[in-house]
Image (cartoon, grey):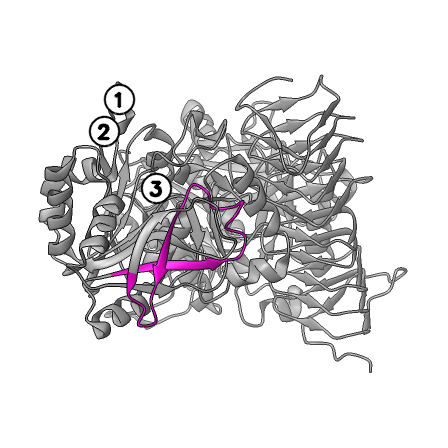
């Protein structure tokens, strides 16, 4: 396909420290979700489905796995002559030495040379840690129709939770008149989703100026957006309706997985017109043994279930042995639950082995238990 | 760089799988939920380091063309390897002309262009795992002109009746190649797989053409065995082996792999079976569903009971439905309350109004592609 005039940059620099050991070796966007996906599959598939050809993935934390993962652009069909997925980590430059990304805006500023190669008309800035399906082409239509300088996707949230978000106050026509980060007394319930479309020429000028400003935090929310509002630029809110989840904590990651057990879960991963693409694994279909007892589960290829598995999400190549029980839990890729082990209300990290007869998690725990190390069996 | 290139042949005339074969060649049969039969011979080649592969397409080329594409999914380097789809002229007036030899003659220019010294030939309708790097090595070491794979069975009286069998002497020389007439239980079934020099292969193809326009390569080699001009050696294959020759053998092969011990001899981490991804989401199993002793592919929605069955991608099984001892191919739908046993349900079919479909293990039922019942 011919080049889209919009280039996407995914901000994937976040360490995701509230996910604890899950992100000790991998960046948050590479964390597994939904049986066979990684979080970054969502923005990447959205880009591919929206007709965006070139995607930069900005990261600086533990980027080896993320880098090798997204480098196989063919997974999202982003491997044609004119398309590609590029991991952009901080690099040493002739004039400035090696700088880490100082903020979200700085991550883009430091890659102006990359963006210039493609000379796009519009720049889409995304966050790499949300689960949602969105057509960015429609958002660009709204941006063009309004003749905006920037368009920010917003999600209506319950008013009582609005003070946890960056809130956009708009006029009757959807023009953003004010941006408030985590306001104590919110005036609106439209939360910023961290998805921006900018007209590139104008943003480029602002970024060049921002880089030189010693008082700036080089952040879109704190600096770029307020400056644009001050300068009287046209910023509009683009309202998103649908499933959207920030999986920033163990509880919310567990919950987002559990959502998939409901028939009407809003995310509808089965929608053939908006597929989420991911790594292709060579494994047999899920096998359910003769003595297994399964009910209300989400399973995928490579699963081998011989025990009791209820209300749980099981990822690729997970094994639940005979006599074991897994309830209200999420088992990430390659988890093995051995004979007689009991796993309840837990999120078990990739490759972890729960030994024979071990008991982890409890049905009445307040929080979900993260199990990130092998658990020894009970003899 | 491999010394050999690979050939996967088109469906021979002796293969006759009721229903499934009405719109696709044997290589395109869906197998074990997410595979197609041809994934096995092609994965054998790429796992053996053979990246130049010719696939011969005869009747109904569409589904295989779709499935194979550029071959990237088989781990073939797109620059120094190649998966070549070769079309052949199918004679609709007289089937006797449709032989593998005529397929090769239709594409002789492309055979001549191959630079590898050896050829590895496999059929598209047999399922097994074989390291052809080892076979090639043994072939070269032995000094044989042709090496042929065979598999020892002890149910040859009533199985493998569409296959050929070989006799092998104590020096592993093949002394005869003939039809399996079911006269003995213990047989060495010929796996339609050969290793030989490319030049000899082309000579044999031309010799067969000159002898009779209806001659196949196997018939030519039968004749060579009788005349004893060539050193033809057998190599015994061990492990899982199935020949999909009719609906019963398709059903049997699918269900015997529900035993994970058997399945592990065919599927192992060091021998991946590659296939084309369809980007299906995982499978949802709802409250009240029961699944026992079954393989379930991705993208399914299951509310009923599934037992001793193989379920393809994107299948929907409604509330209170019972699917027992059956094979349901991709994107089919089994409606609420339907009870089926020993059925093979082809792709896109909807079994909703017919509430009972029961056949027998030695004569499974077949529901046509996209049929509405």
Query: Residue at 49% of width from left, 65% of height from top?
Result: B269
Q: In which quadrant of the rendered image does the C terminus of chain A lie?
A: bottom right
**Placement of B150 over or under A76, stated as above or below:** below
What residue is at 23 percent from the left and 70 percent from the top? A94
Q: From the viewer's perspective, is A192 left or right of B175?
A: right
Query: Mark 1 touching mark 2, by CB under 8 A?
Result: yes
The magenta stretch is B147-174
On whether disc 3 and disc 1 are found on a single subunit, the reply is: yes
Quarter of the image with the N terminus of chain A in it: top left
Across and down, in percent, residue A286 comes to: 63, 51
Mark 1 and mark 2 on one chain: yes
Judge whether residue B213 can be spotted in this image. Answer: yes
Q: Nearer the viewer, residue A180 or B336?
A: B336
Magenta stretch containing residue B165, yes or no? Answer: yes
Query: Which residue matches tag 3?
Result: B68
Is there CB contact under 8 Å for labels 2 and 3? no
How far apart are labels 1 and 2 at the CA level?
6 Å
Percent position (x, y) of residue B104?
Answer: 18, 40
Label 3 element class: helix
For the residue pair B115 and B144, the one nearer the viewer reads as B144
Residue A6 position, x and y percent, is 35, 38
Q: Examine the rendering and report whether any part of residue A206 can be seen.
A: no
Q: Name the image quarter holding residue B354.
A: top right
- Whole-angstrom CA distance, mark 2 to mark 3, is 26 Å
């Amino acid at each position: 396909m011919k080049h889209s005039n919009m280039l996407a940059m995914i901000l994937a620099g976040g360490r995701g420290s509230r996910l604890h050991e899950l992100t000790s070796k991998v960046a948050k966007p590479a964390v597994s979700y939904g049986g066979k996906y990684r979080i970054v599959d969502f923005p990447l598939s959205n880009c591919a489905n929206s007709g965006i050809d070139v995607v930069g993935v900005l990261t600086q934390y533990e980027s080896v796995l993320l880098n090798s993962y997204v480098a196989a652009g063919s997974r999202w069909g982003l491997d044609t002559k004119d398309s590609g997925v590029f991991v952009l980590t901080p690099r040493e430059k002739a004039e400035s030495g090696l700088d880490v990304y100082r903020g979200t805006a700085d991550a883009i500023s430091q890659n102006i040379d990359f963006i210039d190669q493609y000379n796009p008309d519009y720049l889409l800035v995304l966050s790499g840690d949300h689960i949602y399906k969105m057509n960015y082409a429609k958002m660009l239509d709204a941006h063009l129709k309004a003749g905006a300088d920037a368009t920010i996707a917003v999600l209506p949230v319950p008013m009582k939770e609005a003070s946890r978000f960056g809130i956009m106050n708009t006029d009757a026509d959807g023009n953003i008149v004010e941006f408030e980060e985590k306001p104590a007394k919110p005036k609106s319930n439209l939360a910023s989703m961290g998805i921006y479309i900018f007209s590139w020429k104008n943003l480029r000028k602002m970024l060049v100026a921002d880089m030189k400003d010693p008082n700036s935090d080089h952040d879109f929310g704190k600096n770029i957006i307020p400056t644009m509002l001050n300068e009287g630029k046209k910023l509009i809110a683009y309202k998103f309706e649908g499933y959207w989840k920030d999986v920033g904590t163990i509880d919310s990651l567990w919950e987002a997985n559990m959502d998939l057990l409901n028939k009407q879960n809003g995310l509808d991963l089965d929608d053939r017109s908006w597929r989420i693409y991911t790594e292709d694994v060579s494994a047999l279909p899920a096998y359910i043994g003769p003595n297994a007892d399964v009910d209300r589960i989400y399973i995928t290829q490579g699963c081998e279930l011989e025990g009791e598995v209820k209300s749980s999400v099981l990822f690729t190549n997970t094994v639940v042995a005979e006599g074991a029980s897994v309830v209200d839990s999420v088992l990430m890729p390659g988890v093995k639950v051995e004979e007689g082990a009991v796993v309840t209300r837990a999120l078990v990290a990739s490759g972890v082995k729960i030994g024979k007869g071990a008991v982890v998690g409890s049905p009445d725990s307040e929080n979900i238990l993260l199990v990130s190390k092998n658990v020894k069996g009970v003899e | 760089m491999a010394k050999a290139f690979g050939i996967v042949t088109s469906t021979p005339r002796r293969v006759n799988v009721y229903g499934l074969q009405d719109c696709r060649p044997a290589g395109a049969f869906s197998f074990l939920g997410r595979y197609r039969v041809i994934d096995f011979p092609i994965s054998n080649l790429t796992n053996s380091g053979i990246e130049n592969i010719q696939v011969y397409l005869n009747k109904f080329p569409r589904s295989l063309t779709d499935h194979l594409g550029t071959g990237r999914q088989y781990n073939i380097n797109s620059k120094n390897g190649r998966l070549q789809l070769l079309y052949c002229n199918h004679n609709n007036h007289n089937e006797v002309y449709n032989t593998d030899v005529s397929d090769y003659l239709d594409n002789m220019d492309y055979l001549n262009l191959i630079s590898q010294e050896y050829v590895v030939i496999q059929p598209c309708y047999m399922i097994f795992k074989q390291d052809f790097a080892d076979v090639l090595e043994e072939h070269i070491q032995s000094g044989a002109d042709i090496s042929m794979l065979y598999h020892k069975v002890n149910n040859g009286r009533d199985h493998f009746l569409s296959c050929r069998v070989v006799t092998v002497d104590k020096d592993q020389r093949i002394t005869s190649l003939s039809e399996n007439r079911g006269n003995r239980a213990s047989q060495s079934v010929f796996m339609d797989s050969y290793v030989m020099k490319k030049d000899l292969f082309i000579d044999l193809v031309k010799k067969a053409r000159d002898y009779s326009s209806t001659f196949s390569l196997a018939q030519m080699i039968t004749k060579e065995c009788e005349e004893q001009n060539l050193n033809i050696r057998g190599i015994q294959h061990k492990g899982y082996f199935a020949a999909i020759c009719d609906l019963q053998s398709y059903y049997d092969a699918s269900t015997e792999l529900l035993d994970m011990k058997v399945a592990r001899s065919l599927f192992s981490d060091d021998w991946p079976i590659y296939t084309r991804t369809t980007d299906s989401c995982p499978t949802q199993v709802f409250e009240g569903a029961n699944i026992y002793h079954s393989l379930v592919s991705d993208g399914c929605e299951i509310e009923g009971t599934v037992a001793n069955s193989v379920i393809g991608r994107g299948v929907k099984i409604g509330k209170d439905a019972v699917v027992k001892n059956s094979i349901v191919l991709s994107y089919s739908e089994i409606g609420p309350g339907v009870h089926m046993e020993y059925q093979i349900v082809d792709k896109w079919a909807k079994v909703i109004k017919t509430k009972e479909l029961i056949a027998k293990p030695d004569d499974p039922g077949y529901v046509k592609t996209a049929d509405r019942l």
